[in-house]
Amino acid sequence: MAVRILTLVGSLRAGSHNRRLAEAAVQIAPEHVEVGLYDGLDTVPFYNEDIDAEGSVPAAATKLREAAGEADAVLLVSPEYNGTIPAVLKNAIDWLSRPYGAGALSGKPVAVVGTAFGQYGGVWAQDEARKAVKIAGADVAEDLTLSIPGSVVRFAELHPVDDPEVTEKLTVVIEGLAARATATATV
């Protein structure tokens, strides 16, 4: 049985470099790993405890929670917006963190990768994402990172899947996350 990794992308733009990085993860996943790209973060309303009550949880939030609950691990792909995590990704983490102590991320292995225009590849946003999912109860894979700088130039004419350095490093993250999910499942 394949390890299932749910991938959430913090950019809503169809042609975003981070979306393309997530697409690369789907394409290069080894046979024993199924990487799924989640679509629909743009339909999830901002987290509000008033609507997070039995019988009133929005369908888009329920769908996100179910997808995360069915996954063995989660891969967050984050650009950097004004030095921090994009709102859409933070909102997804907020929905997945509830109910407190039993949310869809609770105990689940999570890795964070991404690319950004700047010289550090979005490291601040990725650090913020790791912090948020850790507080949400996830098992954060601190050792599985990938920050790709200069995205606008590097991926101007090259899809990340066609960049050998990127695919090599992304494969390490995917395989490491899958191994962590397998180890978690056997505990």
Image (cartoon, grey):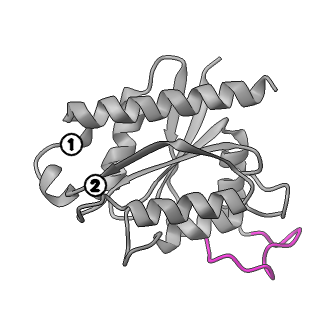
Within-10-Å neighbours for mark 2: few <14, some 14–19, many 20+:
many
Q: Which mark is residue 159?
A: 1
User: Can you tell which mark lies on residue 17?
Assistant: 2
Residue 106: % across, % down? 77, 50
Residue 155 left/right relative to 64: left
Image position, residue 3 (x, y; %): 61, 26
The secondary element bearing badge 2 is classed as: helix
Is residue 11 shown to the viewer in this render? no
Q: What's under tag 2, amino acid-wise?
A: His
Q: Position of residue 165 (x, y in %)?
A: 24, 34
Tell me the distance, in whole angstroms, between the alpha carbons under discs 1 and 2. Answer: 8 Å
Q: Position of residue 125 (x, y in %)?
A: 44, 65
Which image quarter: residue 166?
top left
> Which mark is first along the chain, 2 or 1?
2
Query: Mark 2 and mark 1 in contact (Cβ < 8 Å)?
Result: no
Of residues 96 and 65, the one nearer the viewer is: 96
User: Going 69% across and 65% down the picture, which residue do you hit?
Assistant: 95
**Quarter placement of the C terminus:** top right
Residue with the most extreme right position: 54
Which residue is at 38% across, 53% downward? Answer: 114
Q: Which residues are magenta?
A: 44-57
